[in-house]
Every structure is written in structure tokens, then in C-alpha cells.
């Protein structure tokens, strides 16, 4: 079986790009094989794309839970391991412990969210990616994999929808 090729179509407007995405799906190209790149952050609704599944809230929640656990350990575990009784005060005072536990929870949340954003965005990346410099000038780029047998049909779809530039995509260093 021949290796799939990657085609690129550049559009000026959102509506023709959304129409091209619909027709590419009708041609049998799945959403997993289509990438839309633009200089403007369009929502998935504007392009008729499926809602992306986000993992970032789970990263953030896990970081908050780890931070909460570390905060509880420092506030409760440390005084129980190394107890020092001071003039009738409780071993674990609640008000200062609540503040420290809150701070550790927020620190875990922030660190996990930052690392989750880096991981989800694929940073750092050193390999060349598909890109065209005209995307930075306001164009919308649609990159997709298709079998060589469907190349002419895919080019016809892009041309019918008003693509300004249709070509095989090249990997470029960013």
C-alpha cells in the first residue's frame, strides 16, 4: 500500500475553510488526519470540527490533590513525627495549618497546569512540522493526509471551496 501524502490548502476566510472540511470528511478523510492551522484562534464550532477532548483539567486536579496531600503531610505529619509541646498549644493548630495547606494545594495546581500545558502543546519539539509562512499573514491552512488515489479528488474539493493555494505540504522547521 502506498504511503499517504499530505496536502495543504490555504484559505482567506473561515466559511470556505469550514465548507472544505465538510467536503473532505464526505470524501472519506477522518478528522484525525486533518489539521487546521491559523494565526487567529478559531473555536471548533466555527470550523465545524468535533470538540477536542481536553486532558488539562485532569492534570490540574491531580496537581491540586498532590499539593493538598503534601500540605497535610507538612501540617500534620511533621508535628506528629517530631512533636514539640509548647505551653499548652495544640500540636496541629488549625488556622495556620489551613493557610499552609491552601498554599501547597495552589502550588501543586499551578505547577501541574503549567506542565500539562507544555505537554499538551508538544513543547519542546525539535522535528520539522507542516507549515506555510502565509498562515502568519492571516490565512487559514488545512493540512490533511490522504491516499495517493484520492489526491485529485481532494485537490478538486479544495479548488471548488476556494482555496488560494493547493499543494503537497512540506515539513519546515519552526
Image: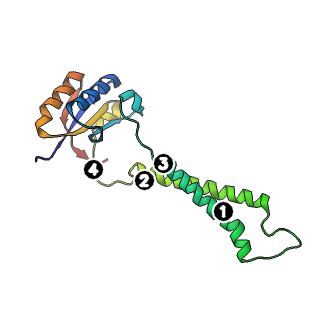
Element on which disc 2 rests: helix
Q: CA distance from mark 1 to mark 3?
A: 22 Å
- The front one of 30 and 39 is 30
Could one spot residue 10 in this view of the protein?
A: yes
Element on which disc 3 rests: helix
Identified at 28% across, 41% down, the residue is 131
Could one spot residue 113 in this view of the protein?
A: no
Color encoding of the figure: rainbow
Q: Which residue is mark 4?
A: 128
Q: Residues within 10 Å of mark 4 (few under 14, many from 20)?
A: few
x then y, percent, for residue 62: 54, 55
Q: CA distance from mark 2 to mark 3?
A: 9 Å
Tell me if label 2 and label 3 are in contact, CB under 8 Å.
no
- The front one of 110 and 164 is 110
x then y, percent, for residue 160: 20, 22
Q: Which is closer to the viewer, label 1 or label 4?
A: 1
Q: Which residue is mark 1?
A: 71
Element on which disc 1 rests: helix
x then y, percent, for residue 157: 19, 26
x then y, percent, for residue 106: 62, 53
Q: Which residue is mark 2?
A: 119
Q: CA distance from mark 2 to mark 4?
A: 18 Å
Q: Residues within 10 Å of mark 1 (few under 14, many from 20)?
A: many
Q: CA distance from mark 4 to mark 3?
A: 25 Å
Q: Residues within 10 Å of mark 3 (few under 14, many from 20)?
A: some
Q: Which residue is mark 3?
A: 56
Compared to residue 83, the image places residue 159 above or below, namely above
Specify whether 93 is left or right of 104. right
Identified at 26% across, 30% down, the residue is 10
Q: Which is closer to the viewer, label 2 or label 3?
A: 3
Amino acid at each position: 500500500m502506498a504511503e499517504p501524502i499530505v496536502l495543504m490548502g490555504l484559505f482567506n476566510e473561515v466559511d470556505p475553510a469550514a465548507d472544505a472540511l465538510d467536503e473532505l470528511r464526505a470524501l472519506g478523510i477522518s478528522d484525525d488526519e486533518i489539521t487546521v492551522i491559523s494565526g487567529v484562534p478559531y473555536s471548533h464550532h466555527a470550523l465545524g470540527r468535533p470538540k477536542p477532548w481536553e486532558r488539562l483539567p485532569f492534570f490540574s486536579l491531580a496537581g491540586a490533590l498532590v499539593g493538598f496531600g503534601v500540605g497535610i503531610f507538612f501540617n500534620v505529619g511533621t508535628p506528629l513525627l517530631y512533636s514539640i509541646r509548647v505551653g499548652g498549644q495544640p500540636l496541629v493548630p488549625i488556622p495556620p495549618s489551613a493557610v499552609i495547606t491552601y498554599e501547597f494545594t495552589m502550588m501543586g495546581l499551578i505547577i501541574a497546569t503549567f506542565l500539562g500545558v507544555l505537554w499538551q502543546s508538544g513543547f519542546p519539539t525539535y522535528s520539522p512540522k507542516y507549515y506555510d509562512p502565509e498562515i502568519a499573514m492571516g490565512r487559514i491552512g488545512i493540512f490533511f493526509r490522504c491516499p495517493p488515489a484520492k489526491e485529485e479528488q481532494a485537490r478538486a474539493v479544495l479548488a471548488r471551496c476556494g482555496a488560494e493555494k493547493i499543494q503537497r505540504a512540506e515539513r519546515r522547521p519552526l
